[in-house]
Image: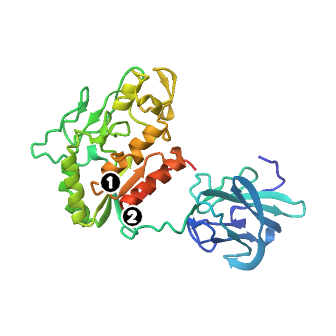
Amino acid sequence: MNSLSYSLPKDSILFDSQDEQFKTPFGATPCGENITFNIFTQKNINCLNISLIIKNGKELEFKMLPEDEKKIGDHDYIVWSLNFTTPSLAKTIFYHFKIVIGNDNTVFYYGNNSLALGGIGDIYENFPIDYQITLYYKNNPTPNWFKESIAYQIFPDRFKNGNKDGKINEPKANSFLYGRWSDIPMYIKNSKNEIARWDFFGGNLKGITEKINYLKGLNVGTLYLNPIFEATSNHRYDTNNYHNIDPVLGTYKDFKDMVKECKKRGIYTILDGVFNHTGKDSIYFKEASTNKSSPFYPWYRFQNYPYDYDCWWGIKDLPCVNELEPSFFKYIVEGENSVINHWMKTGIKGWRLDVADELPSFFIESLKYKCKNIDSESIIIGEVWED
């Protein structure tokens, strides 16, 4: 932090990225559109000038002008304004404000709050946290069925067992099955703090189908399922076979029946696509780690074959893949029996892409193009936690 001779009261500068008197339009913005920024400074702090700092690959500075005055409570404010035209490329850009105060030209900054949640921000002496703006192409309209649709997310293992006898479909080897639905979930770990036994309640696709009328009663229009493909874990983000429904959940027919019954009631289904990594127990990695001649070997990045390999966040159960390796790309996206083709033909309406920020842009664009060719009303949703 810089050492300053004085500090500013929090209400001496006002900006709220989620309030249209400060930023219009609200939220994500089309490429090539104008955004109006307004930031208020109390008259008595003697603000000399304000700049909007935009980070778009490089840092750009735009001078704001004092356009108006406004009284809020007991204080008189100057309203500094700027019309900014967004770049033509869909991406995320970042911004904060640089504020020069007093006769000694002391510099302050106004940026996002400490939690980076947007809205009302904070005054900084240095290193402000940026606000962000997501830019999108106007020629990619949201399908009408998805607009204002209520989405309901289901973690399949924990939702409902639809078997009349209550038994679990094909329990996995070396797994832990709960005696009652009311039991509290727990991990069983070994001395290395690794999960030694995965735990299951036994929810399945028939259970979801039984509850469709309940979902319709909640006005649900979109059903989003966490991964349903064959895997070792209960969360199934460690895919073992992209073409198979996990046997604990049921069969391919069970899935098609569920999608069909949802459609009858105006509910569309989207699936979780985990294409950044597979499971260590997958048919792909098992073969690649035992045979360098395997067609799956180029999918992975080995440092010390077969023990050391790139994996998601260092988790050995989740070996990362080379998404643009031609055979993987064909298997997932382009091939006649690709994963995308196979499941879109069941009537699903799109995908939620796991860790989308870690997938190559070309992979996502191609996947979206493939889905739109199959169903022009399909959607792709990307999971992004990091800015």
> How many C-alpha atoms fall within 10 Å of the one at disc 2: few (<14), some, or many (≥20)?
few
Left or right relative to 19: residue 260: left
- Measuring 44% from the left and 52% from the top, which residue is drawn there? 367
Question: Which residue ends up furthest to the right in the rendered image?
Answer: 103
Count how many numbered circles sit on residues in the image: 2
For disc 2, the marked residue is 376
Q: Earlier in the sequence, mark 2 or mark 1?
A: 1
Q: Is residue 279 above or below residue 291?
A: below
Q: Horizontal and vertical percent for residue 379?
A: 41, 60
Q: Position of residue 244 (x, y in %)?
A: 27, 41
> Can residue 66 be seen in the rendering of this structure?
yes
Quadrant of res 183? top left
Residue 276 placed where, x, y %? 46, 40
As drawn, the label of residue 242 is: none
Q: Residues within 10 Å of mark 1 (few under 14, many from 20)?
A: many
- Residue at point 28%, 46% (across, down): 156
Residue that badge 1 annotates? 344
Q: Residue at x 48, y 32 (%)?
A: 311
Q: Secondary structure at mark 1?
A: helix
**Of 29 and 157, the residue lying toward us:** 29
Q: Nearer the viewer, residue 365 or 9?
A: 365
Q: CA distance from mark 2 to mark 1?
A: 12 Å
Q: Name the amino acid, label 1.
A: Met
Above or below 216: residue 353: above
Q: Is residue 79 above or below residue 330?
A: below
Give the residue displayed 22% in from the left and 40% down from the top. Answer: 202
- Front one among 176 and 85: 85
Q: Which amino acid does the dot numbered 2 rest on?
A: Ser
